[in-house]
Amino acid sequence: MSADLRADFVAKINADYADVRARHANRGDAKRLVSLDAARRQAFRAGEHVPIAPKHPGITAFDHWSLADLLPYIDWTPFFSTWELAGRYPAILDDAIVGIEARKLFADARTMLDTIVRERWLQAKAVVGIWPAQRLGDDVVVDGKTTLHFLRQQVDKPFERPDFCLADFIHDESGPQDWIGGFAVTAGIGIEAHVARFEAQLDDYNAILLKALADRLAEALAEALHHKVRRELWGYATGESLDNDALIAERYDGIRPAPGYPACPDHTEKGTLFRLLDAEHHAGVTLTENFAMYPTAAVSGYYFAHPQSQYFVVGRVSKEQVEGYARRKGWTLAQAERWLAPNLDYDPE
């Protein structure tokens, strides 16, 4: 920026952030946290649920998942959101405001998708692991040797509403043998050459379109794989028969939360998951130093099979919980505060 404009610009940014800090500090106790001990007393209880042993425990890898087989699993609504077109598919195609643009975009997407499948522009790979598991406090011990670390809600709730932690959906040592799953998938192998070709032609539209479709295919693979896990690999829902709308609406038993998302916001846990899966070898997916996945058209996460397992938002956590989490992870408090910064209920400074 020019020297003449810089001072005013920096001053405005500083003022804006000072206002944000003040509002954060004075937000009050409208959503007051309870102590960690109180939250743990209000944990969800796995109850008398008897886990079903998987039909195919351990690692299962899929080196070449057919792209054509993924088409029925595509959720198109997020695709339109990528292009800032608001509305749900298929209603968006007839929307009074964005319908014309949505139909044009959808036609271009279907044309490119046909080419991707026919000419095999992309390769889809996946890996699944299903292992014996046991809850240990707010953590889960996998196969008796690897620990997955989770955080607990600390929201002040009525007695009948639990303060959830993902570990709650796994039995502890006093319960029956339990299991947990993990997965990593990608539909982005081979994308670089095609994106580079479009960019060399200054065709940003088709470069972005290809990336968006690769993302949709990766999400479709995550959906198709979870479907296969429930019915065949784990087999706890062998009689499940759901159409794609029902799958998108998550009307099945079990969840697949991902590290970095609201129920387990610590991105670094992807490192443990990827080691368990040997994801680079089996699925061609790697992690950057900041735990982003590459290729970017990739999805990873856990499988929980408890019929009452559900998604939730951990939200804000106390310093007490962050200190305990740091000890369990072998981190300094500063490391924990860095990775959990969006969830801190206090100013670490």
Image: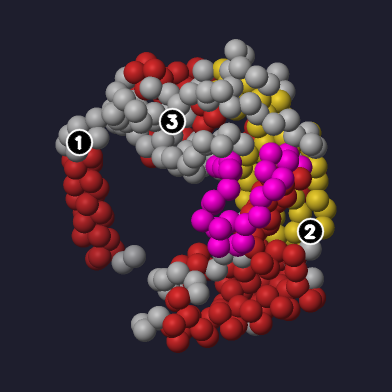
Quick check: is 131 in the magenta stretch? no
- Dominant secondary structure of the residues highlighted in magenta in the image: loop
Q: Which disc is residue 65 wearing?
A: 2
Disc number lying in front (1 or 3): 3
Q: Residue furthest top?
A: 174
Q: Amino acid at mark 3?
A: Phe
Q: Which disc is residue 30 wearing?
A: 1
First in residue order: circle 2 vs circle 1: 1
The 10 Å Cα crowd at callout 2, few under 14, some 14 to 19, many 20 or more, is: some
Q: Which disc is residue 154 wearing?
A: none
First in residue order: circle 1 vs circle 3: 1
Quick check: is 254 in the magenta stretch? yes
Q: Is residue 5 left or right of residue 87?
A: left
Element marked by disc 1 = loop
The 10 Å Cα crowd at callout 3, few under 14, some 14 to 19, many 20 or more, is: many
Q: Are marks 2 and 1 in contact (CB under 8 Å)?
A: no
* Quarter-of-image position of residue 91: bottom left
* Quarter-of-image position of residue 145: top right
**Residue under numbered circle 3:** 164
Q: Amino acid at mark 1?
A: Ala
| Marks 2/3: CA–CA distance | 35 Å
